[in-house]
């Protein structure tokens, strides 16, 4: 059974930083795509960042480019999201996710939630002005 567990959320002031973690267990693939998504109240879930762990290729939403950094520790099977220069509009529940078969249909869809099958429970990030 695939399990993803996020941690590291919290409350910070604008301009601050947080680092989220996502521990992956029970996933049969050694190398795989993995992504971070977020959902704010009343809004649709949106892709924030994604990575192909085989190549370490990364993809970011325009809204977080230059502020967020996705990384992966293969030995620990853990995904990270370093979030700097946080803004109030970054307030949301953040989720990590992996596809059903380790890969996605094409790289252009790296930030599309429909490409991912297994999801964590989410961690709340609140940024105050």
Image (tube, rainbow, N blue to C red):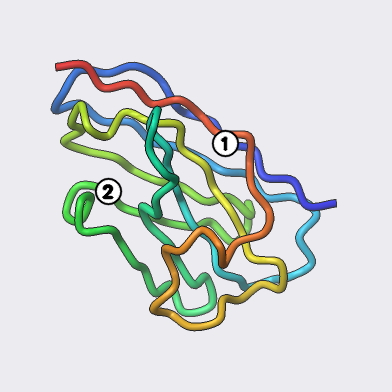
Quadrant assignment for the C terminus = top left
Across and down, in percent, residue 92 comes to: 38, 31
Across and down, in percent, residue 97 comes to: 58, 53
What residue sits right under mark 1 in the picture?
6
Please give the label number shown on residue 84: none
Residue at horizontal 33 percent and vertical 21 percent from the top? 126
Q: Residues within 10 Å of mark 1 (few under 14, many from 20)?
A: many
Side of 113 where 89 appears, left or right = left
Residue at horizontal 43 percent and vertical 62 percent from the top? 50
Residue at horizontal 21 percent and vertical 16 percent from the top? 128
Q: Residues within 10 Å of mark 2 (few under 14, many from 20)?
A: many
As drawn, 31 above or below 62: below
Res. 11 image quadrant: top left
For label 1, the SS is: strand
Across and down, in percent, residue 103 comes to: 61, 76
Camera-nearest residue between 72 and 99: 99
């Amino acid at each position: 059974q695939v399990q993803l567990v996020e941690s590291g959320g919290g409350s910070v002031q604008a301009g601050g930083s947080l680092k989220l973690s996502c521990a992956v267990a029970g996933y049969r693939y050694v190398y795989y795509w993995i992504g971070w998504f977020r959902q704010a109240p009343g809004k649709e879930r949106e892709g924030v960042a994604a990575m192909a762990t085989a190549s370490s290729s990364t993809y970011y939403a325009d809204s977080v480019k230059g502020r967020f950094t996705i990384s992966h520790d293969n030995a620990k099977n853990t995904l990270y999201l370093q979030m700097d220069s946080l803004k109030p509009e970054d307030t949301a529940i953040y989720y990590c996710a992996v596809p059903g078969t380790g890969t996605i249909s094409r790289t252009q869809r790296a930030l599309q939630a429909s490409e991912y099958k297994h999801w964590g429970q989410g961690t709340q990030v609140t940024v105050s002005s």
